[in-house]
Amino acid sequence: MTDETWIAATLTAARPTAIGALLRRFRDLDTAEEAFQEACLRALKAWPVNGPPRDPAAWLIMVGRNAAVDRTRRTRREIPLPEDDALSDLDDAETPRIEDLDHADYRDDVLRLLFVCGHPDLPATQQIALALRVVSGLSVSQIARAFLVSDAAMEQRITRAKVRVARADVPFAAPGAPERAERLAAVAAMLYLLFNEGYSALGGAADLQGPLCGEAVRLTRLLLRLFPAEPEIMGLLALMQLQHARAAARFDPDGEVIPMEEQDRGRWDQRAIAEGLALVDKALRHGRPGAFQIQAAIAAAHARAKRPQQTDWAQIDRLYAALEALQPSPVITLNRAVAVGKTQGPEAALAMIEPLAPRLHAYYPYHGARGAFLLQAGRRAEARVAFDQAIALAADAREVGHIRRHLDRLMADSELAAEKNRGVVGAPSPPTS
Amino acid sequence: MLYAILCYNDEAAVGAWTQEEDAACMARLGVVQDGLARHGRLGPVARLLPTTAAVTLRKGREELVLDGPFAETKEQLLGFYLVECESLEAALDTARELARANPGRGAYELRPVGYYRSGGSVA
């Protein structure tokens, strides 16, 4: 590893901790970011000569803090600004020995930073953009590319988010247990949002998929290291790893989505799967199930099947039932129906999704799944109507193309099925790819 | 004499490598491994999954299963096993068996293996 790579990796790894601590100290995102930037510049000069410090995060925090204090003093001499408390008070408990910062502080600093970026007051797109900018240190134009907007628009989005967050007035005292749990849940949701942003990136933009998913995985891993006994965070990391493991097999050369049942499972990343399975296993040992753990267990059931025919659909059905009980949602029921269709046949699946019609009538995957079940049950005319509805509701040409190809294949399959009595594939919603 | 070479590094920094950097590093290490294998000097090679997947079984009068890696600096790494286990529960059972055979102080850290190369046999 060259100095340069090693230093870059160390700075990236230390960034959330260092900015988190600087944010606690200066209570302002811009100041914390600038202080960290300054510390990085000094690290690039000092580390190749002196070697990396024993605790890079502590080094960066101390150097960044001093740089920012210096700068504020200089500014103050020029303009009679700002008041003393713009710098957290000088007799602050952390002032004398920031190098003694213990890891319990780091923990809440990182959590606070992530929580600030993923603040529930912010719309989802602003949460992700702000986290990528501040926590991950991506440049504005990198983020703009990922969201397919102009640099100026992204700059504005991030500035707005910062203003809003400053107004939200997140407390800087160490959080109590209930508050910490609440923040963890909000941060987990934001990280999954970030992951999904990458995961659902268009096939043609597959080069964007890696970085966003990779960042989400990295930050979740960091969070889990700080909170090692949180089964939901284990579940979240497992879920991401198991889904991301399929990345190389998810798109055909034209960038079209390949449904899971048709993916070349040899291209699934076995190392990511191994980690995902180990984490699910470990999380479930805690006996405190949660939504991420259950979703991870479902992904694990798919990952364990060497071939689609070996999928344990009965287990997937049970897991969806548990998820349904935990957070009732028609989309979850729709996904469960796919498992039910596999174990009890299409009529049972149809019976299960029929009551969802009023709530999902405008959701195209509902009609797509319904069409697949109808076709499987031999009700071809009704199936075609359902597929037509799905096509009419699909948002763009991509989705329409996806359904049409699906439809062609199903129609061809159903002719074979007549003799072979073979099941058809249903891919009602994104999670199944 | 067989030597065990235990690899220590900063997990956060290694975890911040891009996939390409990671693959490039593994490729360079693979070259070294191949050289050792040609001379019949290579035993099993394993890359452990991150410590986030680790579990520790503490020995003692009362069994204690803890999350996370082993963090008792008073004790030293004295050896290791590679055992095929169906699940974490099965791995814990194996560790319990070992603990019964060698009761008293200490702990077993259970770390799933991410990469494994048997390396053939060494004399």
Image (spheres, coloured by chain):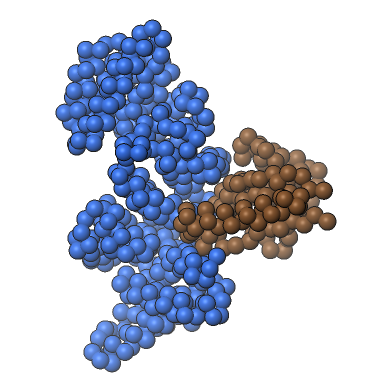
Q: Is residue B11 left or right of residue A38?
A: right
Relative placement, left or right, of B8 versus A302 is right
Q: Is residue B54 visible?
A: no
Residue A115 appears in view: yes
Q: Is residue A408 above or below residue A225?
A: above
Which chain did the renderer colour blue? A
Q: Residue B94: which quarter of the image?
A: top right
The structure residue drawn at horizontal position 41% and vertical position 28%, both measured from the top left corner, is A261
Query: What color was chain B assigned in the picture?
Result: brown
Give A299 or A165, whichever is nearer the viewer.
Answer: A299
Query: Residue placed farthest to the top in the image?
Result: A419
- In this view, the residue farthest toward the bottom is A77
| Residue B115, horizontal then vertical, whole percent | 60, 46
Residue drawn at the location 57% of the way across and 54% of the way down: B27
Q: Is residue B111 above or below residue A37?
A: above
Residue A381, image x and y in percent? 21, 12
In the picture, measured across the screen, residue B109 lies left or right of residue A299, that is right
- Quadrant containing the C terminus of chain A is top left
On screen, A394 above or below A80? above
- The relative height of residue A34 versus residue A270 in the rendered view (above or below) is below
Spot occupied by residue A153 in the image (x, y as percentages of width and height)? 19, 60
A280 with respect to A201 (left or right): right
Q: Quadrant of the N terminus of chain A?
A: bottom right
What residue do we see at 41% from left, 19% from top? Answer: A342
Q: Quadrant of residue A399?
A: top left
Expressed as whole percent of the image width and height from the top left, the position of residue A133 reads: 32, 63
User: Residue at the location (23% across, 36% down)?
Assistant: A398
